Image: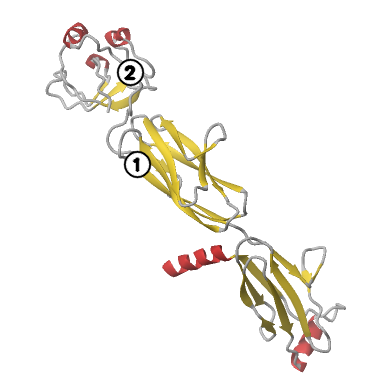
Amino acid sequence: MSKDYSAVPASANWLVQNETFNLTNCNVENCYWPVGHVTSMEISEAKNLEQSWCTYEIKVLGGNKTYIEFQQVSSPSSQPISPWSTSPSSAVGLLKLESTCSSLIWRSVPSNTKSVQIFSLRNCGLHKEKLHLRIEDNMNCFKLISSGENQVSEMKLLLEPMESQKLSVALISTSNESQAYGYLILQRQNSNEKRVISLYGYCGHSVIVIRGPFEDNFGNMWLYPNLQLMTSRLSITNFGNTAAFVKIVQENSSVDIIRPDEFILKKGETANVEITIVMSPERLEMLIGQSCSSKVININKMSLIYGDEASRMRLSRLVINY
C-alpha cells in the first residue's frame, strides 16, 4: 500500500459520503481524484468534479484545516501527489479480477507446432492493478505472448480501474507425446493476493490414413465386395506420433460382420479390417427394390470414427464424472 498523502478539498465534492464538513467525525472512505498528475495549484483551486475522475479508498487523518495549515503540519519532503504515482501497487483489499475463462483447454496439438488461445482479463476494482503474471507447468510448453510477440514464462501487466485487456497463451507442442498441464498465476505485485487459471493440453497428434476404398469426387469412400466370398477389406494406418482410437459403425444395417470394429492404433501401426456381408434372400430383394433405378446396389453405409486416444480418454472421464 502506498504511504502517500495529500490534502483533499471538501468544499468541491471530491469526498464521497461526506455528510458533514466536520471531517474529524465523518465516515469518509473514498474520494474522487483527477486523472494524471495533480499539483498543489489544482488542490488549492478545488476544481469541480468531472465525470472522467476515478474514485479511490482513503483514510482521513485530519480535517477542518486550510491548505496552508496542511503544508505546515506535513513533513518537509512531502508533496501532494496523484494516486497514479509509481508505487508497488495502487490497489488495496481484495484482488477484483474478472476473466472470460477459469481454465484454458487445448486438444491434441501436432508436434513442433503452436496453438494459441486468447481470453480477456478485467480489473473490476476502483484502483489500478499492477500484476505479475507467470506460468508454472510440467513440460515448460505453455507460454505467454507479450505485446512484442515474444514467448515468455512471466510478464508484468498494468490494469487501470475497469480496464480490460486481452491475453494470449500458447501451447508449444514438443516432439515427444505427453500430457501438458499447469497454471497461469495472476498475482498482485508485492502482495500474496492472486488468481489462478488452469491450463490443460496434449502434445502429440494422430494422423489416420485409410487404404482400400475408392474415393469419389464428393469425398465418399466405396468398397466393392468379392461377389463369391461377399467380403471386403481395408487397412487403417496411424502415421502420427500419438495413439489413435478407431470405431466403425453400421448405419443402414447391423447384420454385417466387421472384424475388428473398434481398436487402438499406436503410432506407426496398421490394422486390417475385414467386412463380411450377411445376405439373405429377403435382404437382397429389399436392396434390389430400393435400387431399381440405379445400376449399383448400396448394401450398407458405415461410418469410420477416429481421433486421438488422449482426447477420447479425457472425454470419457468427463462423462464418468458427470
- Residue 123 relative to residue 247: left or right: left
**Residue reaching furthest left?**
25
Residue at the spot x=12%, y=21% of the render? 24
Secondary structure found at label 2: loop
Viewer-side residue, 18 vs 269: 269
Q: Earlier in the sequence, mark 1 or mark 2?
A: 2
Residue at the spot x=32%, y=20% of the render? 33
Circle 2 residue: 82
Q: Is residue 43 above or below residue 307?
A: above
Q: Is residue 181 above or below residue 127?
A: below
- In x, y percent, where is residue 161? 38, 30
Viewer-side residue, 85 vs 178: 178
Instruction: Say if residue 161 shows up in the picture.
Output: yes
Circle 2 residues within 10 Å: few <14, some 14–19, many ≥20: some
- In x, y percent, where is residue 112? 62, 50
Amino acid on which the number 2 mark rests in the picture: Ser
**Residue reaching furthest right?**
295
- Residue 203 relative to residue 211: left or right: left
Instruction: Say if residue 322 shows up in the picture.
Output: no
Secondary structure found at label 1: strand
- Residue 90 relative to residue 271: left or right: left
**Residue 67 found in image quarter:** top left
- In x, y percent, where is residue 19? 18, 24
* Mark 1 to mark 2 CA distance (whole Å): 26 Å
Viewer-side residue, 161 vs 269: 269
Amino acid on which the number 1 mark rests in the picture: Lys
Residue at the spot x=56%, y=31% of the render? 148
Label drawn at residue 194: 1
